[in-house]
Structure formats: structure tokens, C-alpha cells
Image: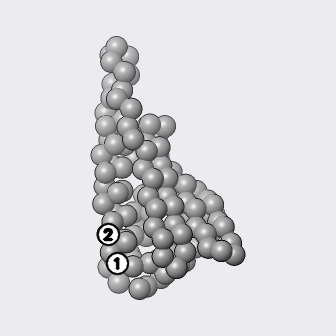
Amino acid sequence: MAQLTLNLVQGAVSFTFSTEAAKQLQAEISALMQSLKAVANSTPGSGNRPVKQESMEYQHTGEVFLEIFCNPNIYPSPFAAKILITLRDDRIRLTSEAELTQLIEDLNVFLEM
């Protein structure tokens, strides 16, 4: 187990995270990216309503509880997407926002270590 550092919109948070959990989160993000691309590629004004995409709700319980949420239907592109992060244990709870692209970079750095 190593320390994963997530860079938030303001500040950063580090916690113990496993490689397996990071790979699972990476797979969830890959599916989210497909949903974001589907929303971005829907053509407004064509008379067809865009197909509503499922939100990503990732949860991991380890030394701390991590929850990551993103609704792909509200962002015009994957590069504009933000995620809501909740990190908590029995003594503290942190809820903050981060950019999706930053989360992807943070995971890649973690998995390269």
C-alpha cells in the first residue's frame, strides 16, 4: 500500500491506497470518459435528445472511505468535467471538488510508482 495524493481545486489530500483499487478506479474513469464523449458528441438542434448517461459513483473502503461522484450529463466535454470527492473516517470528513483530468494524472503518477 502506498500514498495516493489527489490534487483538489484548492489543496491536496493524501491517503493510503492499493494498486488494485487504483486500477479499479481507472477502469471506472475509463467508462466515465466514454459517457462524457457520448454527451459531447450529441448534436444539439438535430431534434434528437441526447441519451442520458449514468453517473459514476465509485466507492472504496480501506483505511479511509473514499467516494468519487461525477454526473457526465452536465459537462460539455471530458476536459471540463469535475468530480466530487468525499474522504472520511471515524474522526474526519472531507468533501471537495477536483478536475477529472487532474484525477487521471494523479492516478497515473500513483500507478507508475
Contact between marks 1 and 2 (CB within 8 A): the answer is yes
Q: Quadrant of the C terminus?
A: bottom left
Residue drawn at 33 percent across, 75 percent down:
20
Residue drawn at 44 percent across, 78 percent down:
17
Residue drawn at 34 percent across, 42 percent down:
35
Residue designated by label 2 = 23
Residue drawn at 58 percent across, 67 percent down:
87
Q: Is residue 77 left or right of residue 9?
A: left
- Amino acid tagged 2: Lys
Circle 1 SS class:
helix
- Give x and y (percent) for residue 98: 54, 58
Q: Is residue 95 visible?
A: yes
Q: Is residue 39 left or right of residue 80?
A: left
Circle 2 SS class:
helix
Question: Few, some or many C-alpha atoms within 10 Å of disc 1 (few <14, some 14-19, many ≥20)?
Answer: some
Mark number displayed over residue 79: none
Q: Is residue 77 visible?
A: no
- Give x and y (percent) for residue 70: 47, 49
Which quarter of the figure has residue 86? bottom right
Q: Looking at the picture, does residue 2 appear above or below residue 106?
A: below
Q: Quadrant of the N terminus?
A: bottom left
Which quarter of the figure has residue 14? bottom right
Q: Looking at the picture, does residue 100 appear above or below residue 65?
A: above
- Marks 1 and 2 sit apart, C-alpha to C-alpha, by 6 Å
What count of labels does the image hold?
Answer: 2
- Amino acid tagged 1: Thr
- Give x and y (percent) for residue 9: 59, 60
Question: Few, some or many C-alpha atoms within 10 Å of disc 2 (few <14, some 14-19, many ≥20)?
Answer: some
Outermost residue, top side: 47
Residue designated by label 1 = 19
Q: Looking at the picture, does residue 28 appear above or below residue 21?
A: above
- Give x and y (percent) for residue 106: 43, 70
